[in-house]
Image: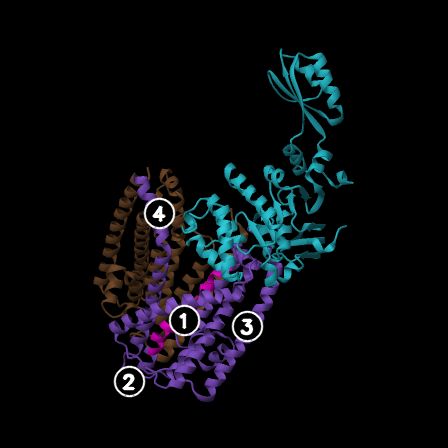
């Protein structure tokens, strides 16, 4: 049941988010205009990196809105109710809160990315690897969200963890080449923001070697595996504690 | 009319309207409510008038939404009156002058002023500074209140660790440290257990007695009113239906008397019903209500025609009377 | 037994909540600064480069200066005001002989002091790790004027916050939304927190100078860097003072109306 009064509120957020994207693009435009390149990338490319980041980040947020409501769920004990229902509890807790309003922001974002991408003379291979790696990035995001939730079950501390995740992934707004080691390594292998957001755009531009693609898929598989194991572990801890 | 000077609270033709946006259900209604919001005027108070003398303790009764809390909020300066004249302790509440605020206190069940994560004593200290209470007077006041309300042992514990009853008592200390001459209590016993309720009532009685404080009390709980308020004001739908002594309310509106009869042998129910309304029948006891004037007659009829072991005639309970008030059975016409 | 361990854990988490929140807030601040730092570091990695009127020293100083300026100007406890109104908690304060505005200003200052302490620690740590070329201002008068502009900036932000926080008087649900739009998004971009405003073309800068935002972060740092001096400097300070007066008047008017319209709900 859609309560439109609440939608009025979300409208303001929508406006704010649109402003934010527009402001950022203006910033990037003038920034690169003045400095000619950033880490070797020109203006259009930099904006493309930014938009790719937005695509992964916003799409993930659309799916995983429910994660932000997780803490009250645990504290109130309603999580137990979810565990008893036949539907897979992980699915419910992760994706149960997809918000219609987010659907409004996504299509224009995709269109903008498509447009800017078009300006860069992509190859077929480039486009294909881009889409594949974007999907791969979403898988990684999923894995990371699962890990955050599992941590939340054990420590009851989820809001701050999620915000830290958001802050770290925000580093993906720019191509990770701008970061020095060890930060760059951290962002590639530990919290694979680079893989989620920079690699797809790089592949699009034909700059990602075959090894890069292999790393991407392997990391996604590894992270998924670990986080699912973690989830099961967390559930076991939880159910044994709350009898 | 009485000497104007010793009227602490004067309210004349107080009107308070609220502008509320109506939200129609459904999607179309929702969309139209964004672009062309339908505003409705809710008339919370429709021109009420009353006055209260210094040191009086008055009870406000009325169903939910009657306007009791709204009245208290206007009197304490929280709400801006749409029209009318209001004077409390010589001030216009809406001006919210510091001298006015130092003289009053509003205590509402759910709105806590104690800082949640700190011990109550910290809030007390804060209030001492806010109300500019001289140190010596503060200590006297603190001592007195904490003894009376039995909170000396808990004032150094984080507020969030305490039970509702304990918190309410500490809230009361915080609200009274500055020795207000006018006290507004909104449902002070709500959520408390029976023992705590009685303690609260005893305290309010003491405060009224010792400090000669003017107190307005709103409550749903009959025992609060019976115990404390000699004078009551009945409010419903923004209008005052009755303003006078509780006893008068009872006398005027207790339409029926209750006859309790103990029978030696099981009677014919139909015959019992011919005497009056059988409220309850649990052999050997039967409870019958009859119109006031007919009570004596009904009693003698029962004694004559039925195997009565014992019989008593009682007043209708105040509870029942006031429940009738709440159900809206009393209207302005009854008052004329 | 396990049940009580769980209860204990929840209580413990709750207990710890505020300290943890604060530390997280600082960690997040550092993460955000790191992004900006690396961005500019990369851009200026070419030796002797001068861009938008900045040398490497000055731009890095700008970024590091952000740590302090943001901690002082933009960290405001008064963010809770909108919540106070929406939940009805403001009632407790309206009943007391206490100036609500001054109350929050005081709480703000105490929170800023705490933030400043942490900002100093973060600054020192980051300085040691990243070894940036920081430009230390020597001119005492400039430093003084910098402090003055910071004081003004703090007051301007506080007023903006109070104005935006008045929305819940009419629409309690909108409080956080309006706050987010203005104090997070608009301030982030238009105050110079993300980038020094002079990367924008002069035409855009001129438009921005009609708003109070540049005076929050960009202007004070410019003063510190010595990039704005003499007549322009004093003109800037004068304009920011005018903003204070203007915002103050608006704030008073809005709050007057807001309090009258307020329905003081929440029992």
Picture coordinates of residue C2 (x, y %)? 30, 40
| Mark in front: 2 vs 4 | 4
Total residue callouts: 4
Kindly indicate whether the residue at mark 2 contacts the one at mark 1 (C-beta within 8 angstroms).
no
Q: Quadrant of residue C32?
A: bottom left
In three-dimensional space, the C-alpha distance between marks 1 and 3, rounded to whole angstroms, equals 20 Å
- In the image, what residue occupies the spot 46% across and 47% down? B151
Residue A36 visible to the viewer: no
Residue B149 vs B278, above or below: the answer is below
Picture coordinates of residue A160 (x, y %)? 35, 57
Q: From the image, tell me which residue sits under label 2.
A: C48
User: What's the colour of chain A in the image?
Assistant: brown
Picture coordinates of residue A242 (x, y %)? 33, 40
Which of marks 3 and 2 precedes in the sequence? 2
Which of marks 2 and 1 precedes in the sequence? 2
Magenta segment main secondary structure: helix
| Left or right position of B91 against B189 | right
| Mark in front: 4 vs 3 | 4
User: Which residue ends up furthest to the right in the rendered image?
Assistant: B336
Q: Quadrant of residue B18?
A: bottom right
Secondary structure category for the residue under label 2: loop
Q: From the image, tell me which residue sits under label 4.
A: C10
Secondary structure category for the residue under label 3: helix
In three-dimensional space, the C-alpha distance between marks 4 and 3, rounded to whole angstroms, equals 44 Å
- In the image, what residue occupies the spot 72% across and 13% down? B304
Q: Any idea which chain is the cyan one in this picture?
A: B
Q: From the image, tell me which residue sits under label 1.
A: C72
In three-dimensional space, the C-alpha distance between marks 2 and 4, rounded to whole angstroms, equals 56 Å
| Mark in front: 1 vs 3 | 1
Q: From the image, tell me which residue sits under label 3.
A: C247
- In the image, what residue occupies the spot 60% across and 61% down? C259
Q: What range of the chain is rendered magenta?
A: C61-82
């Amino acid at each position: 049941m859609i309560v439109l009064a609440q939608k009025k509120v979300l409208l303001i957020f929508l406006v704010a988010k649109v402003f934010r994207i527009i402001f950022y693009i203006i910033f990037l435009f003038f920034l690169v205009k003045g400095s000619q390149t950033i880490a070797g990338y020109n203006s259009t490319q930099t904006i493309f990196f930014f938009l790719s980041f937005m695509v992964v980040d916003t799409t993930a947020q659309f799916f995983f809105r429910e994660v932000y409501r997780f803490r009250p769920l645990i504290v109130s004990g309603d999580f137990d109710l979810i565990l008893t229902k036949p539907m897979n509890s992980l699915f419910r807790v992760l994706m149960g809160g997809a918000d219609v309003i987010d659907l409004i922001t996504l299509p224009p974002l995709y269109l903008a990315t498509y447009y800017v991408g078009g300006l860069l003379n992509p190859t077929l291979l480039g486009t294909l690897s881009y889409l594949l790696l974007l999907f791969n990035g979403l898988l990684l995001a999923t894995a990371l969200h699962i890990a955050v939730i599992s941590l939340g079950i054990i420590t009851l501390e989820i809001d701050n963890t999620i915000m830290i995740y958001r802050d770290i992934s925000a580093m993906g707004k720019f191509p990770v080449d701008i970061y020095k080691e060890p930060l760059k390594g951290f962002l590639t292998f530990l919290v694979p923001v680079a893989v989620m957001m920079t690699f797809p755009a790089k592949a699009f531009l034909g700059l990602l070697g075959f090894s890069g693609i292999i790393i991407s898929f392997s990391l996604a598989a590894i992270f998924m595996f670990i986080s699912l194991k973690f989830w099961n572990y967390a559930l076991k801890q939880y159910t044994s504690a709350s009898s | 009319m009485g000497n104007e000077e010793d009227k602490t609270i004067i309210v004349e033709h107080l009107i308070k309207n609220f502008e509320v946006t109506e939200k129609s259900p459904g999607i179309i209604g929702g969309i139209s409510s964004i672009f062309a919001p339908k505003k409705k005027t809710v008339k919370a108070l429709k021109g009420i008038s009353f006055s209260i003398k210094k040191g009086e303790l008055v009870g406000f009764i009325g169903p939910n939404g009657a306007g009791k809390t709204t009245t208290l909020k206007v009197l304490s300066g929280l709400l801006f009156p749409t029209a009318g004249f209001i004077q409390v302790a010589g001030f216009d509440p809406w001006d919210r002058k510091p001298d006015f605020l130092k003289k009053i206190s509003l205590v509402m069940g759910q709105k806590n002023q104690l800082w949640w994560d700190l011990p109550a004593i910290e809030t007390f200290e804060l209030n001492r500074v806010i109300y500019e209470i001289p140190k010596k007077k503060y200590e006297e006041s603190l001592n007195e209140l904490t003894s009376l309300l039995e909170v000396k042992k808990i004032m150094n514990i984080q507020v969030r660790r305490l039970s509702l009853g304990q918190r309410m008592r500490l809230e009361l200390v915080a609200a009274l440290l500055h020795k207000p001459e006018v006290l507004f209590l909104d449902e002070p016993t709500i959520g408390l257990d029976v023992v705590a309720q009685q303690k609260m009532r005893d305290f309010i009685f003491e405060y009224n007695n010792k400090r000669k404080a003017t107190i307005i009390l709103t409550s749903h709980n009959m025992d609060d009113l019976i115990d404390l308020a000699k004078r009551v004001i009945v409010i419903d739908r923004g209008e005052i239906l009755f303003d006078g002594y509780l006893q008068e309310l009872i006398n005027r509106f207790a339409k029926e008397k209750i006859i309790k009869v103990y029978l030696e042998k099981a009677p014919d129910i139909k015959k019992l019903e011919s005497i009056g309304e059988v409220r309850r029948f649990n052999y050997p006891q039967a409870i019958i209500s009859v119109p006031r004037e007919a009570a004596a007659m009904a009693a003698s009829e029962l004694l004559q025609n039925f195997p009565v072991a014992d019989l008593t005639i009682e007043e209708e309970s105040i509870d029942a009377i006031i429940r009738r008030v709440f159900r809206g059975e009393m209207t302005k016409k009854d008052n004329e | 037994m396990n049940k009580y361990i769980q209860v204990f854990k929840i209580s413990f988490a709750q207990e710890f909540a505020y300290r943890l929140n604060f530390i997280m807030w600082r960690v997040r601040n550092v993460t955000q600064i790191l992004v900006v730092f690396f961005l500019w570091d990369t851009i200026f990695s070419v030796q002797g480069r001068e861009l938008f009127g900045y040398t490497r020293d000055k731009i890095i100083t700008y970024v590091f200066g952000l740590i302090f300026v943001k901690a002082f100007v933009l960290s405001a406890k008064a963010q809770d005001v909108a919540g106070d109104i929406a939940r009805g908690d403001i009632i407790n304060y309206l009943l007391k002989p206490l100036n609500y505005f001054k109350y929050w200003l005081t709480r703000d200052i105490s929170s800023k002091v705490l933030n400043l302490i942490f900002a100093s620690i973060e600054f020192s740590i980051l300085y040691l790790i990243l070894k940036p070329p920081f430009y230390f201002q020597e001119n005492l008068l400039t430093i003084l004027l910098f402090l003055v502009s910071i004081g003004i900036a703090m007051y301007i932000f506080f007023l903006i916050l109070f104005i935006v926080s008045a929305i819940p008087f009419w629409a309690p649900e909108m409080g956080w939304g309006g706050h987010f739009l203005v104090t997070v998004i608009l301030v982030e971009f238009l105050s110079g927190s993300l980038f020094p405003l002079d990367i924008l073309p002069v035409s855009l800068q001129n438009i921005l100078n009609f708003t109070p935002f540049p005076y929050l972060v960009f202007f004070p740092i410019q003063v510190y860097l010595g990039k704005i001096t003499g007549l322009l400097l004093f003109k800037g300070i004068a304009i920011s003072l005018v903003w204070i007066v203007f915002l103050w008047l608006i704030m008073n008017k809005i709050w007057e109306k807001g309090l009258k319209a307020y329905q003081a709900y929440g029992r």
